[in-house]
Amino acid sequence: MRHGRGIALMNQKGGVGKTTTAVNLAAGIARLGRSTLLIDLDPQAHATLHLGVEAGARGGSPGAYELLLDPSIGVGAASVEARERLRLVPAQTDLAAIESELVSAPDRLTRLRAALAAVPEPERAEFMIIDCPPSLGTLTLNALAAVREVMVPMQAQFLALQGLGKLMETVSIVGRGANPQLHVTGVILCNHDAGTTHAREVVADLDAFFEQARSTDRPWRAARVYRPGVRRNVKLAEAPSFGRTIYEYAPGCPGAADYEALARAIVAEWDALRAAQGVVLPGRGVMERASAAGAAGAGRAGGAGGAGGAGGVEGIR
């Protein structure tokens, strides 16, 4: 995504909090006053339903399915305003057929990138979040070709840790082909219980895994574990059934506080990078205060393991 921060949330294991993170991170960034685009590429359409938007079907309003079939439709026509400053490209069950429908198309893996590149600069969102399906296929590969960053929502469990290496290799393969700029920014701990010995051991292993890559050319060399993790919280599981974000459903709960801290960290990283590049940042007054608060949030999200500060900026160059 040009002139903005594009992030694909990816995990080939389902039920790890990926969609919950996609929705609440996107909504959290929008609440900080930043234009945000959320793209639901999962045929289950859970991100779409989470925002209270009815999942479309063939013959209805265009969404992700139509956009991939015909990028000339345009992101504007294929998206809806889900919340203030938050637009959504909704998913449809038809997305499950996209693999077979594009099988003979030579550009089948770069359709989304083409659609995003065609958006006029004044209309481009500053942040883009893509909710990938829990599988590696045409939809996920389109997401990886369209962004620079991958973030991995996962639970601090042994089996999840074992699958992380394979996911990293997938990013490497895409990086060697369709998208040389692709890299892994970090891991977002979901449904996290920092008080258990097992969780602490898994997080320590994650820190060590990323630290070992610092001096390599691997696409996760600047990755880190975002802290604090998103705590286990039943309100996060309840919110989608009401079509609400966690900020709307239970604004005082730990889940809302954790996703707000994560959103502030993501915005603060971006602001730091843009400032280092000499870009005039969008904001005085309210926006400036949001950015300052984001910098404070990044410090809290940094914690051990180098999650914030200059390391974060390096990861999104």
Image (cartoon, rainbow, N blue to C red):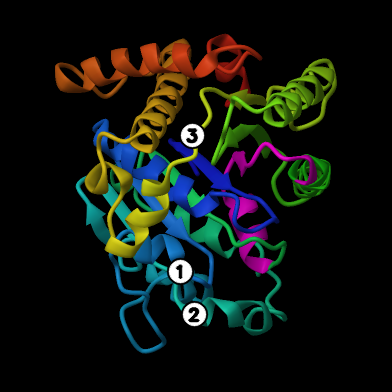
Asked if residue 20 is among those painted magenta in the image, a careful observer would answer: no
User: Which region shows up in magenta?
Assistant: 138-159
Q: Give residue 45's mark.
A: 1
Few, some or many C-alpha atoms within 10 Å of disc 1 (few <14, some 14-19, many ≥20)?
many
Distance of label 1 from label 3 (alpha carbons): 24 Å
State the separation of the CA atoms marked 2 and 3: 31 Å
Name the one closer to the observer, 216 or 12. 12
Tell me the CA gap for discs 2 and 1. 7 Å
Q: Amino acid at mark 1?
A: Ala
Instruction: Tell me which amino acid carries mark 3.
Output: Arg
Q: Earlier in the sequence, mark 2 or mark 1?
A: 1
Q: Position of residue 70 (x, y in %)?
A: 48, 75
**Label total for image:** 3
Of circles 1 and 3, which is in front? Answer: 3
Query: Is there CB contact under 8 Å for labels 2 and 3?
Result: no
Foreground: disc 2 or disc 3: 3
Residue hosting label 2: 93
Q: Kindly identify the amino acid type of the residue bearing the numbered disc 2.
A: Thr
Q: Circle 3: is it few (<14), some (14-19), or many (20+) Cα within 10 Å?
A: many
In the image, residue 242 sits, relative to residue 8, either above or below, namely below
- What x and y, as percent, mark residue 163? 79, 47
Q: Residue reaching furthest bottom?
A: 59
